[in-house]
Every structure is written in C-alpha cells, then in structure tokens.
Image (tube, coloured by chain):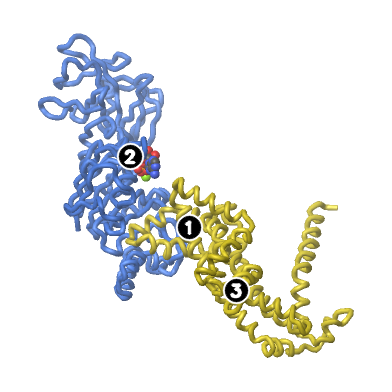
Amino acid sequence: MDDRYVILVGRWVVLTLGVFWSAFPIFMVVSSSFKTHLDIFAVPPKFIFQPTFDNYVLLFREWPQFLDGLVNSMIITVGATVLTAITSLLAGYAYSRFHSRLLTLSAFFMILVRMLPPIVVTIPLFPAVNAMGLSDTHAILILLYAAFFVSLATWILKTFIDQIPRELEEAAEVEGSSVWQRLVRVVLPLSVHGMVAACVFVVVFAWNEYVFALIFTSNEAKTAPLILAEISGAIEGVQWGILFAAASVQLLPILAFVLLVQKFIVTGITAGAVKG
Amino acid sequence: MSTLILEGLSKNYGEVEALIGVDLNVGDGEFIVLVGPSGCGKSTLLRCIAGLEKQSAGDIRIDDRSITGVQTRDRNVAMVFQSYALFPHLTVAENIAFGLRIRRTDKSVIEERVAHAAGLLGLGELTGRYPRELSGGQRQRVAMGRAIVRDPVLFLFDEPLSNLDAKLRVQMRTEMKALRQRLGITSIYVTHDQDEAMTLADRIVVMNNGRIEQIGTPMELYDAPVNLFVAGFMGSPPMNFIELHRKGGNSGAQLETASGQPVPLPERGLSPGVRSVVLGVRPEGLRIDDGGPLKGTVEVVEPKGSETQVFVRLDDLHLLCVTAGKRATFQPGDPVGIAFDATESHLFDTDSGQKITTEKGTAA
Ligand SMILES: Nc1ncnc2c1ncn2[C@@H]1O[C@H](COP(=O)(O)OP(=O)(O)O)[C@@H](O)[C@H]1O
Ligand SMILES: [Mg+2]
C-alpha cells in the first residue's frame, strides 16, 4: 500500500482518538448537568433525554457562594493576566533591546526559580503574606499567579520583540515619540499575538488553580474551584446534578476563551521557529 | 528653515572609526548629497545628526544652537530610512500622521495635512491601505509623506531609492527633485549612486573611510577633483588614470608611461623630487587621433546611441575609455592613436593621491 495513504489514515485515527479522549469527559459533564438524578446514573448512559434546568436553579439557590466564587475567580484571573501581560511586555522589551551582564544574570535567575516546585517557593511566603495583611485578598493570588508565569510570558514576548525591526522604533523616535509611546504604539500592537499566547497560560491556570487558593484564601477571596470542591464534599451527601451544573459553569468560559484565541496560541508558540 | 553645522564630528564603534573629524556647513534650504562607498560612514553621519547614535566627539548645531544634548524626539528632524521603516499595523494615512498624533495635533489639522501630503505624493487613493498592500515605489512615497507632513527643521534621507528597480529609481529621482524645489527644506541625502547625486545636489559631499574627501557643487567635483579618490568616484564611465614616470634628469624632464611611451605635457612646475605622477583624463577629454602621442589597440566598442565608447588597450595595466562620435566605426583590433586635451587633464601625486598644483593654480 502507498505509504502516504497509511500516514494519512494514521493521522486521522490519532486525531480522532485525541479529540474523543479530551472532549468526551467534557461532553459527559455538560450533558449530565441537564439530566435528572435518575438519568445521570442510568446504565447504559442515556444520550437522548428530556433536558432540565433544575440543576442550575438548585445550584444558585443552595450554593449562592458559588456566584461569589465565580466573581472572585474572574477578578483574580483578569488581574493576574493583566499584570503578567504588562510586566512581561516590559521585561521582554528590556531583554530584547538591552544587553548587559546584569540582565543575563537576572534571566538566569528567573528561569532557575521557575525550576523549583512552586509550592516550595510559595509556602514560606505564608507568614509574610499574613503579616502584610494580604491573606484572603484578591491581590495575593493575583501576585502569585502572575509570578508563576512572568518568566514564560517574558520569554515568549522577547522572542516576538526580537523580530520587530529596530528601525521601526527608530522611525517612531525620530517622529517624536518617547520610549513609552513606542512601546504602546509600535511594540505592543506588533507583539499582540505573543501577548495573547502568553496570556492564555495565565488565564487557564488562574481560573482553575486550587492548591494556592486553598492556602491563601479563607472567606472573602475564595475562588470558584474551592466552592466546587465544597459542593462535591458536602456533608449531606453529594448532589451530582448540582456538581455537574457547577462544573459546566466553571468550564464553559475558559473553553470559549481558548477556542476564541486558538489562532493566536499557535502563532505564539511557534514564534521564533520560523521568521515571520 | 534652518542651517546645520557639523564641527569635528567623530564616531567610534569600539575599534572602528566610523567618522573622523567631519566638518560641514549646510546653508538654509540647501540640498546636500552625501556620496561614498559602502561602509564609509554615511549612515552613521545621518544617525548622529538624528540623535540615534551619540557622537564620540565634536558638535552638531542647528540654527547655531548645539543639539548634542538634545534627545532624538526633540530634534524635530525627519528621516527616510533605506528600508522605509513603515509601521506595518498602520494604514498609509496613519503612518503619515504618526508624528502629528504623537504631538497631539488637532484632528482636523492632521486630516488636512495628511490629505495634502498624500496628494503631493500621488497617494490620494491609497490612504486606507496597509504597507503590505503597496508596491515598493508606493511605500517609498509613504515614507516621504511621513517626513514632509510635519514641517521638520531638517530632512535626512538614507539611500531612499536604493531598494527600487532602475526604471522606478530614475522616475522617483525626478519626483524627488520636483519635491525638493517645492519644499525647499534643508536636506542631507545619502546615496551611493553618483547620477542621483549629480541630479539632486546643490552641493555634493564625497566621503571615504569616515572622512570628507571633498565638498563642492556637482560641476566643481566633476571638473576639479582634489584627489584620486574623488576623481575616480565621480563620473560614469570613470576618469582614466595613467601612471607616468619621469625619465632623465631633473630639468627638461620627460614623462612616459610604464611601457615607455613618452607623454608630452606642458611645463607644470613639477617639483624636482617627484619621480612619478598619475595623469587623469575623462573619456570625453580623450580623442582618437592617429597623430596622438599614445598608441594602443581597440579592444571593445560600445555604441551608446548618442555617442560611442571605445576601449583602447594601452599596455597591460591600462585600458582607456574614449568617448567617440555617434557614428564611430572602429573595430576591435584596430591600432589607433590617442590625443588628449591638456586643459582637461589632471595630475595627481602617486603616493598621496592629491592633486598636483602649480604656482599658476591648479595643474592642467
Ligand atoms: N552599530 C555598529 N557597531 C559597530 N560598527 C558599526 C555599527 N554601525 C556601523 N558600523 C561600522 O561603521 C562603519 C560605517 O558604517 P555606515 O555608516 O553604516 O556606512 P555606510 O552607510 O556609508 O555604508 C562601517 O565600518 C560599519 O561596519
Ligand atoms: Mg548606509
């Protein structure tokens, strides 16, 4: 048989399996959130059923704090993303345009710190965070999540900025712009793909993160994943319908976001490999 | 409207001396063309004036005020880069308006000025396009538009036409000239194309190895080059050079070529110590004339339409280019004699390359 044909068929089989593997659980969670308790546990699973919104109504009636959790998650995700975007644009610019021993050293340090397990670097912060009155605030999670991703985001942006010809900035300078104006009007718009690619990592991480949220928040700044865990660990027994509804609400925004920016992710990750 | 003065301007990149003690006075509204071989420091000079590089020594003055400590963005000069350096994410209109926007100019003023500049450059229909949707010539015009839209004190052009094909380059050169007469802004224009230099310049500055070799009007440089470098650089086809050696005693000296052909030159007051000189004559200063003192063989004949260039082999080292009439009928292999006009010949010192002058003024 023709080799090319085998490769083509093989590729399709692998792709189909991959899509099925990652999409099936999502499909089960979302479809179950519209099922009655009985339908959820039907064997074999029902693919055709009478959809119901009861689970969603119950979710927001019995777990109003889930809504607060979503709002907190939203604030923290947006905050961490914006902070990462700004700092990594500035750092990426500095690493791309300036060269000194100190800069090289700091880049090395940034990567070194990132190599350690985050929990090892983070736990010792606890007393300090407490002393500064930052525990159970949005700010502490914003800072933490941004800190985890600045090194990766900076590296992605440096790669992008490396490809912006210096002459463009020189032209902007001759035209009368300051370094900040050049950043905003030239560098930023030309590295927006890299920016989005870098931000996707932060968004996904910040939206889903559990362990650090558990350690550093107790009440006011609790995020949605924490409430989700509470729903699944409720003492009066797990209400599966509500749990699936909550999981769907938690899942869909991030899914929509990733699908929306997938074009950017691909160019962002491959930047530097091919000269554009 | 402004004047520019460079005083002892030097620039080192580590060991490399890109500019060495450059002095230049540019008058108000003057159009200076900077020519010289690649790597001689032309771009570096422009970049120092724009403030993109900081000079190692010397001073730059605009309207007699030093701008050495002034930042690029406050110098109010305009620069057209060889690569055009258009902003790819902005439309033609936005590119042209960039500097005005930065200066927070009134929106209505911006619109009016951009429309005017676009009209002047024939970009009227294209203002909504992005740079990637433009041809090379159109991009070049946008870069020009960005420069002229905001009344700079000085224009700097770094080989603005060198990325265009030959035909377009000639067309844009003519447009440049019209534009320059219309705007009348003090300009420094870099090129390595000496036709461009001759066409556009009020004065030409010839540079080599980081130094200025000569400054003068196009005709001054053509007619009275001060050294071998300028003589060889200006003019196309280039000036012919023949190395001559002095034979015999110090008085009544006889000059002859390496192959021993005597070359009669009128008394020029050559100082007695000089043993060898270089004779320079432009192709139109030579004549094919069987009675001429130099004997050679026709090697190549190139009809140019209005004239014919005949290349004559004098000896192993010398192939002379002679401009002959439109209907010249020489054949390769023809033995010919060459005569030259003493008034159109130049003598240079073989060692220093400098023009040899006599008490009467310039030799030849
Ligand atoms: N950034 C730089 N670092 C080191 N050397 C440079 C730099 N820019 C230019 N040079 C050197 O300075 C000299 C003049 O360069 P340049 O002004 O670009 O020449 P031109 O524009 O006449 O071709 C060259 O020898 C070049 O290699
Ligand atoms: Mg150059």
Report the chain holding disc 3: A
Residue type at numbered disc 1: Ala
Badge 1 is on which residue?
A: A91
Mark 3 residue type = Thr
* In this rendering, position of residue B52 left or right of residue B66: right
Q: Residue furthest left?
A: B360
Which quarter holds ligand 1? top left
> Which chain letter matches label 1?
A
Q: Which quarter of the figure has residue B80? A: bottom left
Is the residue under label 1 in contact with that under label 2 (CB below 8 Å)?
Answer: no
Q: Residue B323: in sight, yes or no?
A: no
Residue nearest the viewer, comparing B331 with B32: B32
Q: Colour of chain B?
A: blue
Dots 2 and 3: beta carbons under 8 Å? no
CA gap between label 2 and label 1 equals: 30 Å
Q: Quadrant of the N terminus of chain B?
A: bottom left
CB atoms of marks 1 and 3 within 8 Å = no
Nearer to us of marks 2 and 3 is 3
Q: Percent x, y for residue B251?
A: 15, 12
Q: State the image quarter where residue A255 is shown.
A: bottom right
Which color has been applied to chain A in this rendered view?
yellow
* Amino acid carrying mark 2 in the image: Asn
Write down the quadrant of residue B220 in the picture: top left
